[in-house]
Image (cartoon, helix red, strand yellow):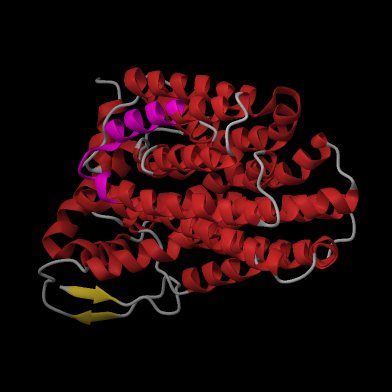
Amino acid sequence: MSTTQVVNGDDTTRETAQPAVAQGSMKYVIILALSAGMAGLLYGYDAVSISGAIGFLQELYDLTPAHEGLIVSSIFIGGVVGVGVSGFLSDRIGRRKVMMFGALFFFIAGLFAAFTQSPEQLIAARIIGGLGIGLSSSISITYVTECAPAKWRGTLSSMYQFLCIIGIFLTNIINFGIAQSGSHEWGVSTGWRWVLGIGAAPALVLFVFMLFAPESPRFLMQSGKEQQGFKILERINGTAGAREEAKAIEASIKLDQSGSFAELFGPGLRKALLVGIFLAVFNQAVGQNTISFYGPTIFRNAGFGGNSEFLASTMVGGVELVFTVVGMVLIDRAGRKPLMLWGTALMAVFAVAMALTFMFNAPGVLVVVFACGFIAAFAFSMGPVTWVMIPELFPTHLRGRASGLCGVFIWGTAWLIGQFTPMMFASWGGQGMFLFFAVLDIIGFLGVRFLVPETKGKRLEEIEAFFRPTK
């Protein structure tokens, strides 16, 4: 049995005679998952970095709630475009190259944002950054999904969300550190530039990681490069496992060749698309990004001050990191569906509790405690599970484009949250806003209960067969 070495990240192969590989390398799979998962770190950093800058920007430019929301949410305008085309691009040029383009766009945007001189320039920079994250976000999950063994696919695909939460946690620390580094006046004039400009660093790391990573084996086989795809499968699963996986992929590809993108809207896969869109919308509609985007503002209104609002956000980010690990441990044991049911139910409870603290003007520490519970419930459920399940639902030849289409709904809903949270908070107060999200959490629970199937432990081709109509 021959093996393939990937040289400098491209598809060049070097054939040498080698004996059969008894078992795959888990270390290799983890490296691949970490490499692609850096797109999550990128998203996590930018999702929260603006929370450390928006207070200073509001004072610098005297922003209205609507204008404040536009600066925060403008990244999702670019994100909708990026994620919308990412699937089509990835099915033409490959998963890896799309992620590299995404990293390059965000690197440029991070530096641009740090040197802007007006709200309009900052909005333009964030739209470019959103284009980069949109290109890389859903495709990174598709990449890991197509590389990971079925037994560990949920855990490994959760690497995106795990690194996203690490990005959020580190960003909260950076926000707090920068706020403490100078006077308030320095923060208004200069500090926020450091907050936004540092985002270029994780973009550079993602680009370098993917420069040396191989292409997805499923994409290679779909593109007629069966030998190269098999060699990567062999390194992941061992020779025997690679043969079994390759047969399943080849059979799926033959079946897929008779289909088209329009097949997504036909019997069978239409249901898969509906499930994917539901998961995409409620990944954001459950309300966690209200705290991620505007945590310091919310805590400031609950009585925190003197930069303690940034410390409170850091505590919430730390809780989110811990419970993301809990979700990664449980996703291939407890299953996708039970985690989402428990998570949405608990989020509804904590959202009501937060509404009551604002309604009765309770001590600010209770707001932080309930915010931690709310974020913890998201972190082990809708956070990682959504990103894992969406690529699992679709056949090989449609996976990139279908994941991109679902990503449009993730980013579109995130734009709504980012844009309208300041307006909801100004009009309804904390009590009205969190009661609104409690209702959405209950709708999310019901949708998971009656719409979403369980995909734990199933090969991608088995999930595909579940949705295909019988002939």
Where is residue 99? Give x, y as percent. 53, 59
Classified by dominant secondary structure, the portion drawn in magenta counts as helix
**Residue 98 image point, x, y percent:** 55, 58
The region drawn magenta spans: 329-349
Decide whether residue 404 is among the magenta residues: no
Q: Residue at x 23, y 36 (%)?
A: 462
Front residue (pair 440, 39): 440
- In this rendered view, identify the residue nearer to me: 287 or 312: 312
The quadrant in which residue 25 appears is bottom left
Q: In which quarter of the image is the C terminus?
A: top left
Q: Which residue: 28% across, 44% down?
A: 331
Quadrant (top left, top right, bottom left, bottom right) of the N terminus: bottom left
The residue lying at 70 percent from left, 27 percent from top is 424
Q: Is residue 192 visible?
A: yes
Which is nearer the eye, 225 or 370? 370
Tell me if 293 is positioned left or right of 400 in this view.
right
The tally of labels here is: 0
Residue placed most toward the observer, 261 or 322: 322
Confirm whether the magenta stretch covers residue 348: yes
Quarter of the rendering containing residue 461: top left
Q: Which residue does the image show at 60% across and 59% down from the upper left?
A: 102
Percent x, y of residue 344 = 40, 29
Q: Is residue 271 above or below residue 251?
A: above
Q: In this view, does 415 lie to the left or right of 375?
A: right
Percent of width and height locating residue 123: 80, 49
